[in-house]
Image (cartoon, rainbow, N blue to C red):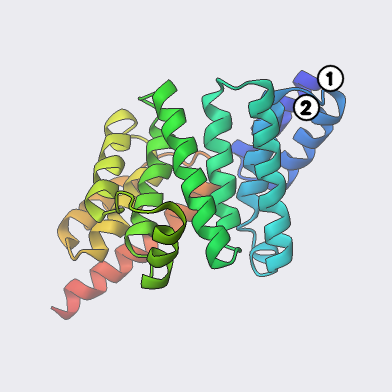
Amino acid sequence: LVEALIAEGRAHDKACDSEKSQLAFEKALELRPEDPVIMVSLSKELSDRVFDHEIFHNKPLARKFAKEASDLAERALKHAPQDTQAYIALAVANARLSMFSEARQKVELTHVIKDNLLKALEMDPKNDYALHVLARLEHTMSNISGFTRYLIKAIYGAIEPATIENAEKYFRQAIEINPKRLIHQVELAKLLYEVKRFDEAKELLMDSLTLEIEDINSVRTRKDGVELLSKLDNRMLRS
């Protein structure tokens, strides 16, 4: 029964139905409460559901989903301390949690997120998803406010600053490892658009829109890609 529920959860995840996937993995975890694979799978669905419209726009509820996802990934790591996917799941859940946190907790979570991603990459240097999440973290942190930079220095002292260049490098490494993953190309295109490398961004977007949808994250990212491509087209028409 547990294996059937895991298969059901994965099928719903691939069909982009995170709510049904969550329910299947919750039932599986009830039957096998110490299974780190189920914990990681459920953590992913809860992290994904943070972006459901009715959850995302309800800050306490969004925090609840993200915190539960983080707690599950931490539990998984206690059972399987060498599980790369658990480190990535914890990083993703904490990234979601940081979106609904105050400045100091956001800074503390950012430090933990990066540590977990580096641990994942130490165990599996070719993990394209870990590189993707690291690239997004680097991109986000390269644009932080002066106050957040002050907090980082106050809490952790001098640390290597995040840069757009590093973010691009990690995205390109992820694409090299897995060129068929849509999210890598769209997120890099967003970065290139931000630094006004419009032709490169458009080329990536055109390619990305031909790639397979993997889960709800691909659906949301593809929508971002379509919107960005439209902005690029409109910009070219005006020029």
Which residue appears farthest toward the left when viewing the image?
Answer: 239
Asked if labels 1 and 2 touch by Cβ distance under 8 angstroms, the answer is yes
Residue drawn 65% across and 32% down?
40
Q: Mark on residue 1?
A: 1
Q: Give x and y (percent) for residue 31.
A: 86, 25
Q: Residue at x 70, y 37 (%)?
A: 72
Q: What residue type is labelled 2?
A: Leu
Give the vertical position of 23 relative to 153 (above or below).
above
Horizontal relation, residue 27 to residue 216: left or right = right
Mark 2, secondary structure of its residue: helix
Q: What residue type is labelled 1?
A: Leu
**Numbered-mark total:** 2
Dot 2 corresponds to which residue? 5
The answer to whether 175 is drawn above or below residue 31 in the figure is below
Which residue is pictured at 53% across the width and 66% down the height? Answer: 103
* Picture quadrant of residue 233: bottom left
Q: What is the quadrant of residue 176 in the picture? A: top left
- At x 65%, y 35%, the residue is 73
| Residue 7 seen by the camera | no
